Structure formats: structure tokens, C-alpha cells
Amino acid sequence: QVQLVESGGGLVKPGGSLRLSCAASGFTFSDYYMSWIRQAPGKGLEWVSYISSSGSTIYYADSVKGRFTISRDNAKNSLYLQMNSLRAEDTAVYYCARDLITGTRVVDYWGQGTLVTVSS
Amino acid sequence: EIVLTQSPGTLSLSPGERATLSCRASQSVSSSYLAWYQQKPGQAPRLLIYGASSRATGIPDRFSGSGSGTDFTLTISRLEPEDFAVYYCQLGTFGQGTKVEIK
């Protein structure tokens, strides 16, 4: 069965960095576009970034552009999110997500999420 | 960027009643990319509808989606106790959500 398992969340000070990982299993990872989506405490969903199956196409939300970098390693079935210059408003649960249909950002599988807290 | 506005913010209904949730786009969009999700507290969202009207795998037929252009609707024909949750529409970015609560 499809599984997405995030790791790497935690407490970090403003201006700090964190790298999130997502281990995928149960499907051919290299065939799918993947996304990171976040949810601040008590708030709605915010799409953060996505990456094409080969890694050649990448998009970011304006709120993270220039600070976050998405990447993937198809040989390791893994998705990553490097987060730099973190701000208090980046505090959220970060979900790894699989595209149902290539390039649509419609998500059919979600991870359980990893919490990132940015606070001094 | 397209903005999705969901209404109402909160819908108070009883089990067995019909729920109608609205999602309005700031400009005309392709329905091929419009999706609806359900989220319960402490859980990841679950895909209900994609392509505006296609049910995802395993979704009961009491959930249906419709619409085109700028106006889309999620209908739950008869609310079951497990349907009380927050619902989001998505076209790349997400709407702000509609909470369906027990009256």
C-alpha cells in the first residue's frame, strides 16, 4: 500500500534552517509529481511547493520562494524540503503529498505530517 | 493567482440532512483540476472529488461534486455522523475551508 512518511520536523529559531524528508513506498515513486503542503495550527491548508517526476519542473508558493528548496532522489524514493531563513509564520504541520494526476496538484495520498515550530 | 472563496464558513446541520458547500473562483477555471477534500481533527486531508465531479476511490456516493467556470459545489446528500468535518476545495491553492458541524 502507498505510504508517505515525513521526518525532520522540530523546533528551530527564527532565521534558522531545517530539512524535511519524506520516504515513499508502495508505488513507483519516479512516476509521480510530489508536493509539500502545510497547515499552520488551527488554520487552513497552504500548498508550498511541487516537483515533477524527473525533478526538472519545480514551483513554489510566493510565501516561500527564495527560502525553500524542494528536491527528490528517485533512487532512494525520497522527497525533501530544505527550509532556510525560517520565520514564525512558517510554523505548521508539513505534509508530503502525491499527485493523483500529473501536474494537477490534486493529492490522492498524504503523509501523516511533521510539525515545524519556529520560535525563539 | 486564482483565489478560491468557500461559503459558508460554517454549516450547522443534523445527521440525515443535505449539505451544500460552495467554492467560487476569482476567474474562470478548468474544472479538470478542481478537487474537494475532507479533513477531520488530527488527521491528514482525504481526497473526495477530483475533476470537479469524479469521486475518488472508496468515496461513498452520497458525496457529489458539480460546477464549472467559476462556481463549484460539493453536495453531501444525507449527512452521516462521520461526515462532520472541515471541507476544502482546491485548484492548486486551497480555499479557506467550510466546517460542517452538528446542529
Image (spheres, helix red, strand yellow):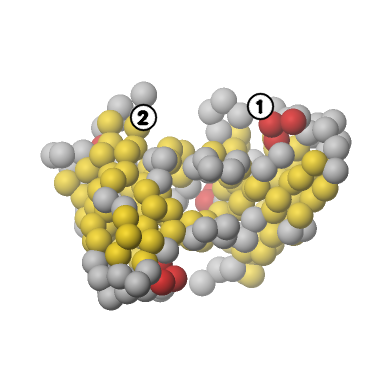
Residue ID for mark 1: B60
Above-or-below relation of A40 to A63? above
Which percent across, then down, holds residue A30? 23, 40
**Which quadrant would residue B60 be assigned to in this image?**
top right
Numbered circle sitting on residue B73: none
Which quadrant, please, contains the C terminus of chain B?
top right
Observer-nearest residue: B52 or A119? A119
Label 2 to label 1, Cα distance in Å?
21 Å
Relative to B92, is B20 on the left or the right? right
Above-or-below relation of B61 to A64? above
Which percent across, then down, holds residue A87? 37, 73
Relative to B88, is B81 on the left or the right? right
Residue at screen point 53% across, 51% down: B33
Residue ID for mark 2: A2
Observer-nearest residue: B74 or B53? B74
Kind of residue sitting beneath label 2? Val
Observer-nearest residue: A59 or B37? B37
Residue at screen point 65% across, 47% down: B86
The tally of labels here is 2
Relative to A108, is B98 on the left or the right? right
Above-or-below relation of B69 to B39? below
Q: Residue furthest left?
A: A75
Circle 1 — which element?
Answer: loop
Decide: few, some or many residues near mark 1? Use Cα within 10 Å; few <14, some 14-19, many ≥20. few
Residue at screen point 43% across, 53% down: A93
Q: Residue furthest front?
A: A120
Kind of residue sitting beneath label 1? Pro
Asked whether residue A101 appears in the rendered view, the answer is: no
Circle 2 — which element?
Answer: loop
Identify the subunit bearing mark 2.
A
Residue at screen point 53% across, 43% down: B42
